[in-house]
Image (cartoon, grey):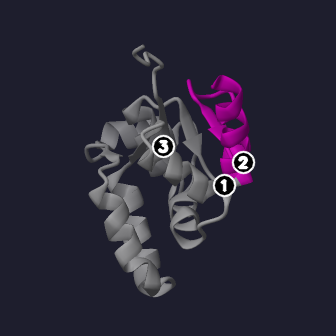
Amino acid sequence: MKNTQKLFKVFLDTSVLLSGLNSPFGASAFIITLFKLKKIIIVISPEVIFEAERAIKTKFPLLEITFFDFLTIKPLITPRLTPKEIKSAYNIINSEDTPILAGAIKAKVNFLITLDKKFQVLVKDKVRFEVLSPAEFLRNFREQI
């Protein structure tokens, strides 16, 4: 019997990505494991990659190889954002997280996963996807399967 279940497209912000790569036992790591098992599709943007590379270089140098390994398993990477896309997201949330939101909107994801509770509150009911913490996403995922 063929599995016809549609995979969720899940956008990870930088904090979730680095948390998942840094600690193998947390909810963020479990989301990355679901991706490796082809149970979900992870989407990131060039902006997430840039932020992650900068944080790895300055704060987490031991994650460099782990991050490279993650990229080799081919998460979806959005095309670079246009000024129009950033401006549109800026109208929803005026913060350093504007490019993250713009990337998730561009990718037409089902979920944006973040560890930033303030970000979750600021965009609630303003986008077509859910903005959840890693633990909230996992609860939601379990209910769907």
Q: Nearer the viewer, residue 3 or 102?
A: 3
Residue indicated by mark 3? 11
- Residue stretch rendered in magenta on the structure: 117-145
**What kind of secondary structure does the magenta stretch mostly adopt?**
helix
Which element is circle 3 on? strand
Residue 26 lies, in percent from the top left, at 67, 61
Where, by quadrant of the figure, is residue 47 drawn? bottom left
* Image mark for residue 135: 2
Residue 133 lies, in percent from the top left, at 69, 48
Residue at the (32%, 59%) spot, across then down: 71
Residue at the (31%, 43%) spot, across then down: 78
**Dot 3 crowding, Cα within 10 Å, few <14, some 14–19, many 20+:** many
In the image, 62: left or right of 142? left
Badge 3 vs badge 2, beta-carbon distance below 8 Å: no
Where, by quadrant of the figure, is residue 79 drawn? top left
In the image, 21: left or right of 50? right
Vertical arrangement, residue 138 with respect to residue 67, above or below = above
Badge 2 vs badge 1, beta-carbon distance below 8 Å: yes
Report the mark closest to the observer, 3 or 2.
Answer: 2
* Image mark for residue 67: none
Going from N to C along the chain, the mark reached first, 3 or 1, is 3
Residue indicated by mark 1? 27
Q: In this view, which residue lies farthest toward the front? A: 1
